[in-house]
Every structure is written in structure tokens, then in C-alpha cells.
Amino acid sequence: MKACFIGAGNMASALIGGLVAGGARPADLCAVDIDAGQRDRLAARHGVATHESPEAALAGADCVVLAVKPQQLPAVAASLAPGIGGRLVVTIAAGVRIGDLSRWLGGHRRIVRAMPNTPALIRQGISGLYAAAEVGGEDRELATRILGAVGEVLWVEHESMIDAVTAVSGSGPAYVFLCIEALEEAAIASGFPAGQARALAVSTFAGAGALAAAESEPPAVLRARVTSRGGTTERGVAALEAGGLRVAMREAVAAALRRAVELGDESGRAA
Ligand SMILES: NC(=O)c1ccc[n+]([C@@H]2O[C@H](COP(=O)([O-])OP(=O)(O)OC[C@H]3O[C@@H](n4cnc5c(N)ncnc54)[C@H](OP(=O)(O)O)[C@@H]3O)[C@@H](O)[C@H]2O)c1
């Protein structure tokens, strides 16, 4: 696999780092970025070739990964269109629909749309992927390999579900950070100094998350296991339920989903 990344920022660096750690040869990867500092950082960190413009970079690539900001994508795609040929294009730009990207790429249809999340930066992400009808099995495997380098991969059948992935796992890390903040504040209110409160809150979320991932039982069963009748956890969980945690989470995802659809509509009007 020879892949060329357009945009050498955070996500491109995470994906390239994951691919190299997984055995990809740096010589088979390259990146294009208009920012010389980004190019230098990426080359120093991962030993890949970098370029200021895509012409030379595209020549040897089977696959192009679009890792620029969504608002930069119309211009980037238009500049790639003449040289894109039959290459697989994987886009990770949030909210940009395949139909719009295809139009900016001059009708190119071999496109996979992916939605990663920030834990990808430490290779513990999860990405939703959707392929246009024209994308075959080998291309799906290639996209799975690229996003799989930074965490789990989940294919969805309808492109609209990428908006739902955005609302759940794309925005999800912020929901979790908010919960960590809330537990930290509660720890401070219970008398812990700030450093200890942070450690208690962060380690509790990290440990419980790792345990939930390691166990085959659903989280509800794990919760029941630590909730003895008449005990402290039972009281605490009851307070969270009474406070509307589940309703708030459902509303958070619904609100994020509505915004994802709006952003898709807005970016579609961009060019
Ligand atoms: N970070 C996440 O967790 C996450 C999650 C899901 C999806 N995404 C998506 O991933 C994409 C990349 O995010 P990021 O955080 O990696 O962004 P980033 O760090 O800003 O990286 C994008 C890079 O592309 C460069 N660039 C801009 N125009 C270019 C052009 N014409 N040709 C080549 N390079 C160009 C930018 O340079 P300048 O800075 O000079 O503009 C920047 O260095 C975004 O579309 C975002 O929606 C990110």
C-alpha cells in the first residue's frame, strides 16, 4: 500500500504513526502540507517524505487520505481533481458528504468517508467508515487498514449513519471529559486537594473504561456487580438516575446529530 496524506496535521500524524508502528514502510507513505513547520515535524517524527504541493506526491500513491480541515476541502479537492486518476480517496473531514466531495473532485466516486475521534491520537480511537457504492472489497480493506492503525473500525451501511457516528463517538470524548470534570469537582467538594481530585476522577474513568472494554459482559452487568443492595454505590447511582443522566446523554447525541446534518448542508453549499 502506498498512501499520500493531504494535510500533515494532528490526524495525519496519528494515522501515519499508527501505520508505521503496525509495520508500514515510511517510504510507502508521504504527506503534503502548505505549512513548512508541519512538513518538518512530520518528516522528523515518522521519517516520511513530505511535499509542498500534491503533483509529485500523487504520482506513486495508490490511495489519497484527505486530512485537511473541512473548510479547506473544496479548494484542496479541486486542486487534486486533474491528477486523481482511479485512486482510492479516504476523507476524514468532519461533515463533508461524499456527493459534495465527488463533485469537487470532478466526478470521482472511489471514495471512503471516515469519522475518527481524538483518542486516535494515542491509537485508542474508534472510526466509523462508509463507502460509496463504487468502492470494492480491496479498497474497503485498504481503508480499514489505514483507520485501523489508530483504533477500532466500524463500517456503516448508510452515509447518514456517519453523522450519527459523529454525534456518538466523534463528539463523545468531550462528553466523557465533561463527566470526568464533574467527578473531579465533586471530589474537590468532598475535601480532596485539586491534584488528588483529578487523579481520582481520571483514573476512575480510565480504569472503568478499560474494564468495560476487557470484559465480555455489558456495562449494565458490570455496574450491577459493584452495586450491593443497600450500599454506597446504589445510593450514588440512584442520584445520577434521578438527576437525568440518561436523558441528558440522549439529548446530547440528538443535538450533536442535528448539528452534524446542518454542517453537512453548509459544507455542501461551499462550492
Ligand atoms: N482531530 C480529530 O480528532 C478529528 C476527528 C475526526 C475528524 N477529524 C478531521 O480530520 C481533519 C484534520 O484534522 P486535524 O486536527 O489533523 O487538522 P490540522 O492539524 O489543522 O491539520 C490540517 C493540516 O492541513 C494543512 N493544509 C491546509 N490547506 C492545505 C492544502 N491546500 N494542502 C495541504 N495541506 C493543507 C493545514 O495547514 P494550515 O494550518 O496552515 O491551514 C494543517 O497543517 C479535519 O477535517 C477534521 O474534521 C479530526
Image (spheres, helix red, strand yellow):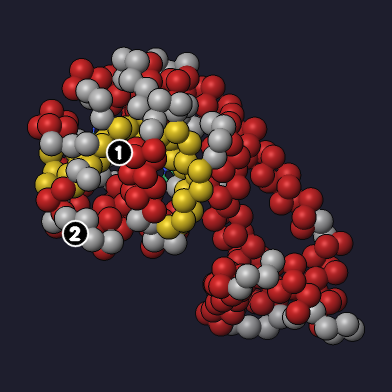
Residue holding disc 1: 65
- Residue 16: tell me if it is visible: yes
On the picture, is 200 further left or further right than 9?
right
Residue holding disc 2: 45
Q: Residue at x 49, y 32 (%)?
A: 95
Q: Residue at x 61, y 55 (%)?
A: 175
Percent x, y for residue 191?
Answer: 68, 83
On the picture, is 19 further left or further right than 241?
left
Percent x, y for residue 18?
Answer: 30, 58
Percent x, y for residue 10?
Answer: 32, 50
Identity of the amino acid at label 2?
Arg
Identity of the amino acid at label 1?
Val
On the picture, is 73 further left or further right than 47?
right
How many numbered markers are drawn? 2
Q: Crowding at label 1, few (<14), some or many (≥20) Cα neighbours within 10 Å?
A: many
The quadrant of the picture occupied by the N terminus is top left
Q: Crowding at label 2, few (<14), some or many (≥20) Cα neighbours within 10 Å?
A: few
Q: Is 50 or 144 nearer to us in this picture?
A: 144
Q: Is the residue 193 above or below the residue 7 in the image? A: below
Q: Is the residue 199 above or below the residue 49 in the image? A: below
- Residue 6: tell me if it is visible: no
Q: Is the residue 87 above or below the residue 219 in the image? A: above
Which SS class for mark 2?
helix
**In the rendered image, which quarter is residue 227 located in?**
bottom right
Quarter of the image where ligand 1 sits: top left
Percent x, y for residue 266?
Answer: 51, 22
The quadrant of the picture occupied by the C terminus is top left
